[in-house]
Amino acid sequence: MTLNTIALELVPPNVQDGRERALEDAQKVLRCSAETGLEGRIRHVMIPGMIEEDDDRPIEMKPKMDVLEFWTDIRSELPGMNGLCTQVTAFLDKPALRQRLMSLSSAGFDGIAFVGVPRTMNDGEGSGVAPTDALSIFDDLVPNRGVILIPTREGEHGRFNFKCDQGATYGMTQLLYSDAIVGFLRNFAKETDHRPEILLSFGFVPKVETNVGLINWLIQDPGNPAVAAEQEFVRQLAAAEPAQKRKLMVDLYKRVIDGVGDLGFPLSVHFEATYGVSTPAFTTFAEMLAYWSPDQA
């Protein structure tokens, strides 16, 4: 079963902003969709389970609404949309994680990506279930079991292959600011028989990124020249005028779609407006989808 979807990432609001902010976010999605011709096209909302990370995060991490609570608040505002989410597994034992996954599934989450510990911890730390174990343990409960795919990360080929062996049905890429995913999937297709669905992730870069640097921080991998090139592209996007910014993003999208479209992987698209939903972001997404879209493929 494939998702075959256009997904939009919505980060849960801060707890202090509550249900009112959650409803504002949902209404903004509807308004921006209507303004840019995307009304009825977005089929999933992807809600990340936010966990506290490094102290150097450019925007302070305040306590966030729980994924399930956020989705419960906004679901009725977003007709025709179901949920996707990420779930940190490393802090829940097997019974607690099973109960959590049952609650998410019954609430309308069609896909759940299992993720590990934050960057401040080492793989394997945490008293709960490892994400790779969760893929096989809960295959009866979660039909669409996802993992994060970072094509520029050292050793990612073996890591992703192992996750597929364990039962991953889809990979959601880190935000793509280069076409590194093309070479990665081309090599992966040559060397393995796994053909999981790939959610290709693209993020809008507003001018404020120049001063804040949140996207730069999110994709960082110190000492990795491939990521350094992506960070430079993000800086270029942030400084560009709207028309040029759209052209740069659409050109990247075309290179990625053209490069991976014939490799045998089912494809979906995942969009992120890291600094919040906006009409300029949706205008860019609409232009990308005019070139290729999973709902019209």
Image (tube, rainbow, N blue to C red):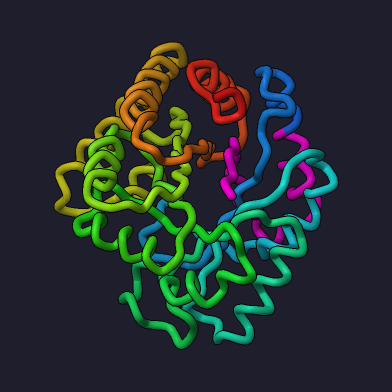
Judge by depth and name the residue closer to the eye, 223 or 166.
166
- Left or right for 52, reference 21: left
Judge by depth and name the residue closer to the eye, 278 or 133.
133
Residue 46 is situated, as x and y percent measured from the top left of the image, at: 60, 49
Tell me what residue is drawn at x 75 percent, y 31 percent: 30
Q: In which quarter of the image is the C terminus?
A: top right
Q: Can residue 227 be seen in this view?
A: no
Picture layout, residue 291 above or below residue 100? above
Tell me what residue is drawn at x 78 percent, y 39 percent: 80
Q: Residue furthest front?
A: 193
Please tell me in which quadrant of the rendered image residue 293 appears. top right
Q: Can residue 254 be seen in this view?
A: yes
Tell me what residue is drawn at x 61 percent, y 35 percent: 277
Residue 122 is situated, as x and y percent measured from the top left of the image, at: 31, 76
Q: Which residue lies furthest to the right in this view?
A: 76
Judge by depth and name the residue closer to the eye, 260 or 238.
260
Picture layout, residue 181 above or below residue 66? above
- Left or right for 57, reference 86: left
In the image, which residues are magenta? Answer: 1-29
Residue 23 is situated, as x and y percent measured from the top left of the image, at: 79, 46
Badge count? 0
Picture layout, residue 84 above or below residue 107? above
Residue 247 is situated, as x and y percent measured from the top left of the image, at: 40, 15
Is residue 14 highlighted in magenta?
A: yes
Is residue 123 highlighted in magenta?
A: no
Please tell me in which quadrant of the rendered image residue 244 appears. top left
Please tell me in which quadrant of the rendered image residue 3 appears. top right
Tell me what residue is drawn at x 35 percent, y 71 percent: 120
Judge by depth and name the residue closer to the eye, 153 or 105.
105
